Image (cartoon, rainbow, N blue to C red):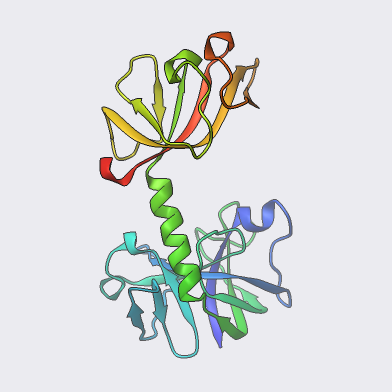
Amino acid sequence: MALHVQIAAYEYGCCGSIPEPGAVIEGTLTAYPAADDEQSPVDEPFTWDRDMQLLRFDGWSARWDPTGGDPTTVPLVLVLSWHDRAPGPTVRGVVDARIPDERFGVHEGFGVTVRLSSESCIEPTPEVVAAYAEQEERESRTVRITGPATAFGDVAPAVDVPLELNLDDPRLSIELNSAGISGVVTGVPAQVSVAVQAELWTNYQPIDPGFPTESVPYPLMLRFTIDRDFC
């Protein structure tokens, strides 16, 4: 099967070279909505497996991110990645040609578009897809909280031990709170670190659970997973 796939520059920029004809490459395949001026849209019929988040074509398949909406209503392009954590179908093949494209050009920083001849397409198992969905759901409830050590209690919290916090406490800085959760919540810390500010960066150092917070001269940083009841 011959596939036209886009490969972002960062895929090969950090640990490889621009894919040339004859190169053997392997990665996960994901479909995305195509831009209006796309030169290599997918024009094959497919079925949509919502539970597996897959679009199945004749002899191959591609992952579809559900945030993209209904794939049957938009033109599609294919993106190949070997850095994406999402569980997409794995394809391995030989680059037949690079395809000129105004945005994903031959040598430019956006990346390249190639025609890939692939003989295999291996889908992820339902267990892998379910585990990834569970991880994503958990991460959606995880915030980063920084504040004076005493704001977290008399002693340093422990990872995976339930904790109650007031997210409206003015002493606390809350990041990654995309859901806008506020007020008193319960949850478990996924990370507890001392945040030591250096000149150009913050150095996160471990702290023993139960250590008296009044003796900690630096802020604490918690990665804190909020219980579902508050989301």
Specify the quadrant that holds the C terminus. top left
Q: Is residue 142 above or below residue 59?
A: above
Q: Residue at x 41, y 83 (%)?
A: 56
Q: Is residue 16 above or below residue 198?
A: below
The quadrant where residue 119 appears: bottom right
Q: Residue at x 28, y 64 (%)?
A: 69
Q: Residue at x 38, y 46 (%)?
A: 140
The quadrant where residue 173 appears: top left
From the viewer's perspective, tell me whether residue 174 is left or right of residue 184. Answer: right
Give residue 156's position: percent from left, percent from top.
53, 22
Can residue 227 be seen here? The reply is yes
Q: Residue at x 53, y 32 (%)?
A: 158
Give residue 187's position: percent from left, percent from top.
38, 37
Q: Hey, which residue is sitting farthest front in the picture?
A: 210
Q: Is residue 104 above or below residue 97?
A: above
Can residue 30 be seen here? The reply is no
Q: How many marks?
A: 0
Specify the quadrant that holds the N terminus. bottom right
Q: Is residue 92 above or below residue 45?
A: above
Give residue 131's position: percent from left, percent from top.
47, 63
Residue 190 vs residue 66, the one in the foreground: 190
From the viewer's perspective, tell me whether residue 120 is left or right of residue 45. Answer: right
The quadrant where residue 227 appears: top left
